Image: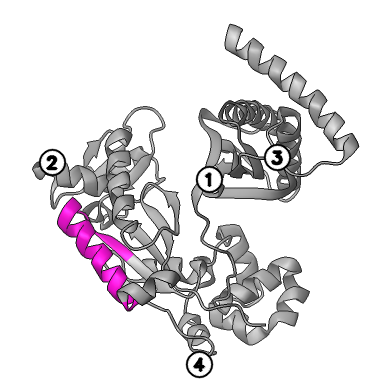
Amino acid sequence: MQAARRTVLHVDMDAFYASVEQRDDARLRGKPVLVGGREGRGVVCAASYEARVFGCRSAMPMSQAMRLCPHAAVVRPDFAKYTEASRAIRAIFERFSPEIEPLSLDEAFIDVTASLALFRSARRIAEEIRAAVRGELRLTCSVGIAPNKFVAKIASDLEKPDALVDLDFDLAREPDALAARLAPLKVERMWGVGPVTARSLHARGYRTFGDIQRAGERQLIADFAESGAHWWRLAHGLDDRPVETGRASKSVGEEETFPEDIVERAEIEAKLVAQADEVGRRLRAKGLFAQTVEIKIRFSDFETHSHARTLATPTDHTHELRQHARELLASFARREWRAVRLCGFSASKVTDAPGQLGLFDGEKRDRLSKLDDLRDRIRDRFG
């Protein structure tokens, strides 16, 4: 049975942090702006489009960005101000749909399927959102319209900044139209395809979505196992994930950038375990349980990898979070390892209720809960 047709927007603010700074300080308008810290191993949080002309981009070391654009204005980030702006943007989205999944302060998915009867078309909703953001907040955003989240995110990025791209093809009436539109795009636009994976795809002749489409699903599975099936679906613009609203879209995480790169895997494991401890403590303090856990590793060359797993039963237990952190790291490190600049651990898809437990699982969880309670008391008392 064919799934009901959906219409999803992806709204992405244009150079958000830098644009807020330019909006609030007339001296910065029309000039290259880098938001981030100058000191030590400072990183660019955001680069204005004027700075991007010189090759500056977010996540770049500030020292490198300053070499590329020595006349750029460097502004220390003001997250309280960006959060306030983000709340105002969210309030605009809520005029058009309650089905909102924020991804960060500056981007979100909006399922407008149920809103179409009132606003007539997704394009009209997107145009009104862009007009409100510009008129009320003096900022710009790019909006992608599509039948699902994956394609909506691609669409919002195709013509940035300040653009609207509509890829909301009716696949029941035009089954091949979306795949044809995606065919020329490079595989690097797929979620989960970083530099290492891209090289692996290129080595087998897959450089564009069209290359993957033409190969067929069976060949992709033969070449890349389950990942091949995933990429085949994405190449055809297929994505069944719902827009997740409310608490299920929130996460709790910790990450650390090191003053000097760390080579020893055991040292990174110790860092991740400590981060898992803190994430567990924060989950328990909020009465939350996590369904998904993830580690993040950034190498010294800034290549970044994230590895996640979905748990059979949501958890808030330190022992289990530690174990997942160790296993995710071990699985990743077997494939690739070198000097590490940053590592992080996060828990997401949180809920305020644990999953169903069997009798013996329940007894084990009771013991873990008592141990976690003792840990939290010691932490609260002694730091």
Residue range of the region highlighted in magenta in the rendering: 120-142
Q: Residue at x 49, y 87 (%)?
A: 180
Q: Earlier in the sequence, mark 4 or mark 1?
A: 4
| Real-space Cα separation, disc 4 to disc 1, in angstroms | 36 Å
Few, some or many residues within 10 Å of mark 2 (<14, 14–19, 20+) = few
Mark 1 or mark 2, which is nearer to you?
1
Q: Along the polypeptide, which appears first: circle 3 or circle 4?
A: 4
Q: Which residue is mark 2?
A: 25
Residue contact at pointers 1 and 3, CB within 8 angstroms: no
Crowd class of label 4 (few under 14; some 14 to 19; many from 20; radius 10 Å) = few
User: Label 3 belongs to which residue?
Assistant: 354
Residue 56: tell me if it is visible: no
- Asked if the stretch drawn in magenta spans residue 383, the answer is no
The amino acid sitting under disc 3 is Pro
Q: Is residue 129 highlighted in magenta?
A: yes
Tell me the amino acid under the disc marked 1.
Arg
* Of pointers 2 and 4, the one earlier in the residue sequence: 2
| Contact (Cβ within 8 Å) of mark 1 with mark 2 | no
Residue hosting label 4: 173
**Measured Cα–Cα span from mark 3 to mark 4:** 43 Å
Q: Residue furthest left?
A: 26
The residue indicated by pointer 1 is: 247
